[in-house]
Amino acid sequence: MSYTRRSKDELAARVAQDIPEGATVNLGIGQPTLVANHIPASREVLLHSENGILGMGPAPAKGLEDYDLINAGKQPVTLLPGGAFFHHADSFAMMRGGHLDICVLGAFQVSATGDLANWHTGEPGAIPAVGGAMDLAIGAKQTWVMMDLLTKQGQSKLVQTCSYPLTGIGCVKRVYTDLATLACTPQGLVVIDMVDGLGLEELSALIGLPLKAG
């Protein structure tokens, strides 16, 4: 059967769908920032950025950007009524103090049991970029990953054991990809949903690991 991958915006909308009312959520650099554009205006969610913002809204309209108001990825953002910006140290106190319900991060690799590798590939000349990922991965009550399932070379980013330097051990609860949403458990990967036209056996072959239906 044929299937179509989720676009980056469709993937962001899929992540936003699972964020509950009243949650405080950090959106990491890269693809996760798109999630802000897909949270319904009727749902109260406090979006956090590690450079010191709480209460971010969607991206500003073209021509209305304020480059004095940016997220951790240096992208211009908006601030919802009641939102605030503050010192970097206060932001990390929120992250380390267990005050975030969810963080959504990108990744180079995630293991079947939830180990996360997202700061360095170990390749010669690669620039390590740990940022606040370790603080977020361990400090948030739930860590979700948002990424393409396969590398440009067609290798799965979901693996039995991470070969890249680890950010956190057993911290990832869910992985949202362009082909499927999966839960990481002590017993391995459980499929929550897949794109239309993709079957469990085909997905398992792409990942190279056994999968359980949720």
Image (cartoon, rainbow, N blue to C red):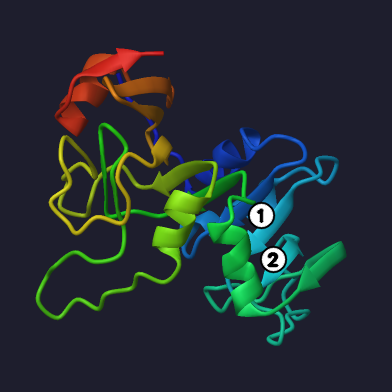
- Going by the numbered disc 2, the residue's amino acid type is Ala
Tag shown at residue 36: 1
Marks 2 and 1, the one that precedes in the sequence:
1
Give the class, few, some or many, for how many residues have Cα within 10 Å of label 2's Cα (few <14, many ≥20): some
- Going by the numbered disc 1, the residue's amino acid type is Ala
Residue 193 place in picture, x, y as percent: 44, 22
From the viewer's perspective, is 102 left or right of 158? right
Q: Which quadrant holds the N terminus?
A: top left
Residue name at image x 22 percent, y 16 percent: 201
- The residue nearer to you, when weighing 37 against 22, is 22
- The residue nearer to you, when weighing 23 against 58, is 23
From the viewer's perspective, is 147 left or right of 210? right
Residue 181 place in picture, x, y as percent: 42, 30
- The residue nearer to you, when weighing 188 against 202, is 188
- The residue nearer to you, when weighing 79 against 202, is 79
Q: Which quadrant holds the C terminus?
A: top left
Would you say residue 136 is visible in this rendering? yes
Vertical comparison of 46 with 2: above or below = below
Pointer 2 residue: 59
Vertical comparison of 83 with 102: above or below = below
Residue 209 place in picture, x, y as percent: 17, 26
Vertical comparison of 94 with 68: above or below = above
Residue 198 place in picture, x, y as percent: 33, 22
From the viewer's perspective, is 173 left or right of 160? right
